[in-house]
């Protein structure tokens, strides 16, 4: 009987402690949202998926939801196509303005690549970016100074690099020409 009383007294003592001016996690989240609202036309590409406006999508998110959110942020779909011969299996590609291509298999987001716009591509209505300083078109020196940068030796696709364990890309000349994450349809 004595042990439960000691535990109850300890719990009451902790409950009476005041954390002072430290906000709770919920208060911090509300405060962060108030200080830095998410732009509806912002797409951030991440190693595990992407965000479009206030919505976050991990790889495996539904194709319709991802396409709708990207279209709301960047403008309408430019084109969509399929390649049944990808090494990872049949893949559907959906292109958006600004050089963003979303990759889908069986109706699920599996990857993305962000490349310099090609002939016929329109500019994005919104903004596409990666977290950090390195962006599409960044100079080689900025890329090579980035945390997690490593050259991919022996690539048959060009001058390839990795940024950490899950984002890769290509440099042409002195500029970053493409980033990618997730499942790709590269023929090496």
Image: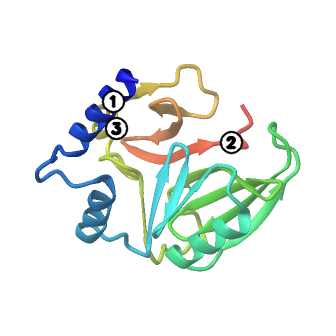
Q: What residue do we see at 80% from left, 38% from top?
A: 88
Query: Is 103 located above or below residue 155 in the figure?
Result: below
Q: What residue do we see at 46% from left, 25% from top?
A: 151
Q: Position of residue 51 (x, y in %)?
A: 50, 60
Q: Which residue is mark 1?
A: 5
Category of crowding for the residue at label 2, using alpha-carbon neighbours closer than 10 angstroms: few (below 14), some (14–19), many (at least 20): many
Residue 81, label in figure: none
Category of crowding for the residue at label 1, using alpha-carbon neighbours closer than 10 angstroms: few (below 14), some (14–19), many (at least 20): few
Cα gap from disc 3 to disc 2, whole angstroms: 22 Å
Q: Earlier along the polypeptide chain: callout 2 or callout 1?
A: 1
Q: Which residue is mark 3?
A: 143
The reply to whether callout 1 and callout 3 are in contact (CB within 8 Å) is no
Q: Earlier along the polypeptide chain: callout 3 or callout 2?
A: 3
Q: Earlier along the polypeptide chain: callout 1 or callout 3?
A: 1
Residue at the left extreme? 20
Compare residues 119 and 166 and report the one nearer the observer: 166
Q: Is residue 79 left or right of residue 155?
A: right
The reply to whether callout 3 and callout 2 are in contact (CB within 8 Å) is no
Q: Which residue is mark 2?
A: 183
Q: Is residue 64 left or right of residue 118?
A: right
Q: Is residue 73 left or right of residue 133?
A: right
Q: Is residue 67 left or right of residue 187?
A: left
Q: Viewer-nearest of labels 3 and 2?
A: 2
Question: Is the image coloured rainbow, by chain, by secondary structure, or in one colour?
Answer: rainbow
């Amino acid at each position: 009987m004595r042990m439960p009383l000691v535990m109850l007294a300890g719990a009451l003592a902790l409950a009476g402690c005041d954390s002072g001016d430290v906000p709770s996690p919920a208060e911090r989240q509300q405060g962060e949202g108030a200080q830095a609202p998410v732009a509806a036309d912002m797409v951030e590409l991440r190693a595990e998926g992407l965000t479009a406006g206030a919505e976050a999508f991990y790889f495996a998110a539904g194709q319709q939801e991802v396409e709708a959110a990207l279209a709301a942020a960047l403008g309408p779909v430019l084109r969509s196509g399929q390649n049944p011969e990808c090494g990872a299996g049949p893949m559907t590609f959906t292109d958006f303005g600004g050089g963003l291509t979303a990759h889908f298999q069986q109706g699920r987001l599996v990857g993305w690549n962000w490349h310099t716009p090609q002939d016929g591509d329109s500019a994005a209505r919104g903004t596409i970016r990666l977290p950090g300083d390195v962006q599409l078109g960044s100079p080689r020196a900025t890329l090579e100074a980035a945390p997690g940068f490593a050259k991919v030796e022996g690539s048959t696709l060009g001058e390839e690099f990795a940024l950490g364990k899950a984002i890769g890309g290509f440099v042409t000349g002195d500029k970053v020409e493409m980033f990618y994450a997730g499942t790709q349809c590269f023929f090496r």
